């Protein structure tokens, strides 16, 4: 069950309260901004607008594809860039070798994330002035927008480190925000999340027609992710308390069918804490229509090139082929291997008529989690290849368990409790057949994170924060000053000398 959070210039969506119907269509004429945000409906339309850039993270701006997973995984060592060659989406190829330049980088993602910041700021700024809105509703709306702003800055912070920060939109020339150090950006992110989480202002759960909306567990997961990446020991116990709260709520659990998580029927299953929704019935196309409501292009990006006669999958462009070493890192019997990675040799045994055309960097292993499924865009009447309905899974309950285990180890807590969380994950991985427990050490947790979250955009960030990036990725060109990407040249130029470039 999925519902899309949408916004348009002619058609807006009206939300009557913080917990009511989230998607009532309301036609509107052009309205001056200073005359807007006066009613509950109007501020809720602004909130919906703050969600829309979430869907843009995989778009094709200026012929750049830049999903969170892909830009992370090409740096993590478990996928290759692929495509038609080094000149085909060259930012992927350069990022994989840690040779990205200010001119060739995923600069469109910078624009997407700041668009989200801008829209979240509008909600935060305007909600207090809405008449007739109860304080509970104002607090809910504001906390939701603060969590979205934290999410957008979280990705800017991880990708670029020292970035411009503003919590009020710039309303006068020269429209240049102050660049903060990465540690300062982290403090701002945590400040937003702690404020949003205090006094239970956020929704704990949502009905099916609100799926995709920020909830308290989503904000807790985002907070824990930021704390762990920052290695903020002063907040480890707070993050652990959040993980235990999610676990103790009994609202989430692991599903037995790991491969099923990635099917449409697996969207918003009991394991899902938060997803970014996509729908195949929208009208997204290429620029300038790339920001229209619709599906995702990421499955097309990593799909198997020239795939023919397949019973299950559509073809794609062949980016992101999987390193064989990842496939062979799994123990025999681990259902996550063939439940998340398509080995052509294995697949061809059950679909012998299928063929494909290998592209650059071909390995014979592919990202099964986001592979374009047959039927995933059948209902689209426009450009089908950019309108697959695959949701992007941002936070899964298995990560809650993994975070809890890691935080217990890092704070000297009960190793039996930590081992129990890991055991739950490992038991599912081996289909509940026999004892496959591992000891709760940081090295084992890092290894297990690689296997559990393969091809979901985690590996590079895990290697960095565990202090293993240079050891694992050094041969590919990683050095500590490559932790952050170079700031896009266009942004340096526009800043009139106020932005300091990262090393590259």
Image: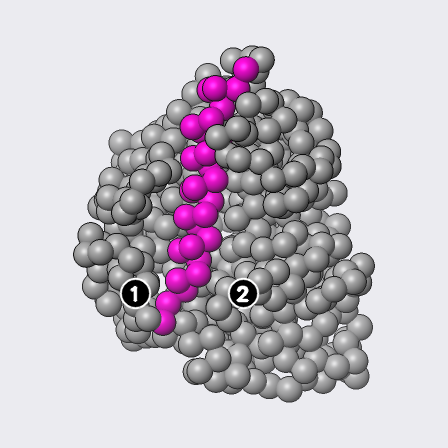
Tell me how far mark 2 sits from mark 1, CA to CA.
19 Å
Q: Nearer the viewer, residue 39 or 409?
A: 39
Secondary-structure class at tag 2: strand
Q: Quadrant of residue 497?
A: bottom left
Magenta region, residue range: 104-131
Q: In the rendered view, does 162 fall on the left or right side of 288?
A: left
Q: Is residue 503 above or below residue 92?
A: above
Q: Which residue in the structure is indicated by mark 2?
A: 60
* Residue for point 26% across, 50% down: 162
Q: Quadrant of residue 186?
A: top left
Quick check: is 453 in the magenta stretch?
no
Q: In the rendered view, does 377 fall on the left or right side of 358?
A: right
Secondary-structure class at tag 1: helix
Q: Where residue 398 sits: x, y (%)?
A: 55, 44
Q: Where residue 57 sits: x, y (%)?
A: 51, 55
Q: Is residue 21 above or below residue 65?
A: above
Mark carried by residue 489: 1
Q: Nearer the viewer, residue 260 or 11?
A: 11
Q: How many marks?
A: 2
Mark carried by residue 15: none
Q: Nearer the viewer, residue 14 or 467?
A: 14
* Residue for point 35% across, 55% down: 159
**Circle 2 Cα neighbour tier, 10 Å, few/some/many (<14 / 14–19 / ≥20):** many
Q: Is residue 19 at least partly visible in the picture? A: no
């Amino acid at each position: 069950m999925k519902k899309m959070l949408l916004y348009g210039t002619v058609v807006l969506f009206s939300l009557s309260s913080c917990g009511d119907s989230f998607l009532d269509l309301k036609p509107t004429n052009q309205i001056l901004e200073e005359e807007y945000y006066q009613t509950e409906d109007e501020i809720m339309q602004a909130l919906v607008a703050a969600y829309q850039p979430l869907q843009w993270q995989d778009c094709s701006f200026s012929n750049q594809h830049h999903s969170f997973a892909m830009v992370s995984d090409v740096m993590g060592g478990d996928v290759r860039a692929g495509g038609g060659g080094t000149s085909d989406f060259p930012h992927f190829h350069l990022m994989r070798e840690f040779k990205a330049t200010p001119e060739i980088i995923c600069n469109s993602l910078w624009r997407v994330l700041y668009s989200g910041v801008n829209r979240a700021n509008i909600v935060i700024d305007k909600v207090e002035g809405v008449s007739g809105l109860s304080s509970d509703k104002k607090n809910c709306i504001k906390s939701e927008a603060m969590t979205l702003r934290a999410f957008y800055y979280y990705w800017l912070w991880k990708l670029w480190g020292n970035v411009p920060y503003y919590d009020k939109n710039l309303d006068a020339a020269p429209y240049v925000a102050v660049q903060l150090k990465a540690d300062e950006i982290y403090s701002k992110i945590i400040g937003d999340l702690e404020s949003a989480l205090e006094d239970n202002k956020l929704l704990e759960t949502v009905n099916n027609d609100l799926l995709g909306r920020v909830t308290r567990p989503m904000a807790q997961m985002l907070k824990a992710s930021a704390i762990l990446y920052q290695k903020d020991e002063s907040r480890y116990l707070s993050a652990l308390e959040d993980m235990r709260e999610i676990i103790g709520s009994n609202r989430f659990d692991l599903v037995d069918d790991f491969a099923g998580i990635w099917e449409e029927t697996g969207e918003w299953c009991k394991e899902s804490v938060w997803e970014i929704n996509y729908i195949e019935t929208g009208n997204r196309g290429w620029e300038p229509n790339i920001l229209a409501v619709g599906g995702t292009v990421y499955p097309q990006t990593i799909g198997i090139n020239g795939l023919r006669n397949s019973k299950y999958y559509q073809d794609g462009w062949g980016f992101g082929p999987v390193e064989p070493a990842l496939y062979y890192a799994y123990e025999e019997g681990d259902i996550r291997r063939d439940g998340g990675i398509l080995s052509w040799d294995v697949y061809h045994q059950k679909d012998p008529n299928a063929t494909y055309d290998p592209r650059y960097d071909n390995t014979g292993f592919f990202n099964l989690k986001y592979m374009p499924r047959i039927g995933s865009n059948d209902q689209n009447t426009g450009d089908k290849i950019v309108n697959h309905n695959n949701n992007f899974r941002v936070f899964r309950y298995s990560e809650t368990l993994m975070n809890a285990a890691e935080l217990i180890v890092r704070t000297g807590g009960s190793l039996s409790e930590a081992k129990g969380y890991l055991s739950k994950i490992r038991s599912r991985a081996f289909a509940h057949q026999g004892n496959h427990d591992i000891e709760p050490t940081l090295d084992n947790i890092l290894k297990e994170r690689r296997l559990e979250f393969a091809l979901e955009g985690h590996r590079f960030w895990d290697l960095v924060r565990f202090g293993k990036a240079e050891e694992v990725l050094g041969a590919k060109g990683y050095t500590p000053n490559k932790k952050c990407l170079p700031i896009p040249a266009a942004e340096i130029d526009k800043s009139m000398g106020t932005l300091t470039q990262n090393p590259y």
